[in-house]
Image (cartoon, grey):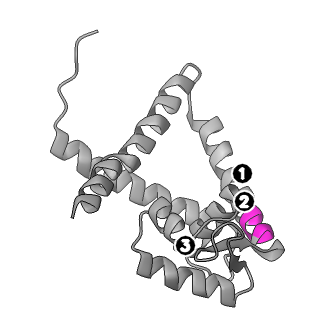
Amino acid sequence: MPDTVVDVDEAAVELALALKRLRARLRAEARPSEGWTISQLSALRRLVAEGPVTASHLARSEHVRPQSMAAIVTTLRDGGLVTAAADSTDGRKTLLRATTAGRRLAKARSESREAWLVAAIDDLTERGRADALVDAITLLNALADWGIDDRSASRARR
């Protein structure tokens, strides 16, 4: 099969637009969030999945500035979805944990959004396209992580 020539600039624009549309659709398909923003829900979901972590770890993982994550965490704590406690091995660090209410909200949001996505993939993906979907997911994750280690190394040298 011949190599396909890709207009990288056009592909970047099309990808950004497709991701924007998909993100909006996922938000629309999820149950009402009771006033929580997508950033707050994303941070909460990560806390549920990864367990106790620091706010700085959460900021790096969510690709946001530490100041932005501090505001997100404050809102989640005020809402009773997250607690904070000193790290038992390093008292200088504070570990964040999802509360029972936080875990319930993350699960409900995830289930409603994923139910729509599973149905859409099942309906729209032709047989034999599963490998293409897996490849696309791998590429999207690689794009999300591209250059992170390089930036971290360059910041450490400053």
> Which of label 1 and label 3 is nearer to you?
3
Q: Residue at x 29, y 53 (%)?
A: 153
Q: Looking at this view, is 64 or 109 the one in front?
A: 64
Instruction: Say which residue appears at 59% left-offset and 87% top-offset.
Output: 74
| Outermost residue toward the top in this view | 1
Q: Read off the magenta span.
A: 103-108
Locate residue 131, reporting x and y percent: 52, 23
* Res. 156 image quadrant: bottom left
* Label 1 element class: helix
Secondary structure of the residue carrying tag 2 is helix
**Residue type at tag 1:** Ala
Residue 14 in the image, given as x and y percentages of width and height: 29, 48
As displayed, is residue 3 above or below residue 28? above
Q: Which residue is mark 1?
A: 115
* Amino acid type, label 2: Ser
Q: Quote the CA–CA distance across marks 1 and 2.
A: 5 Å
| Left or right relative to 37: residue 47 | right
Disc 2: which residue:
112
Q: Which residue is mark 3?
A: 55
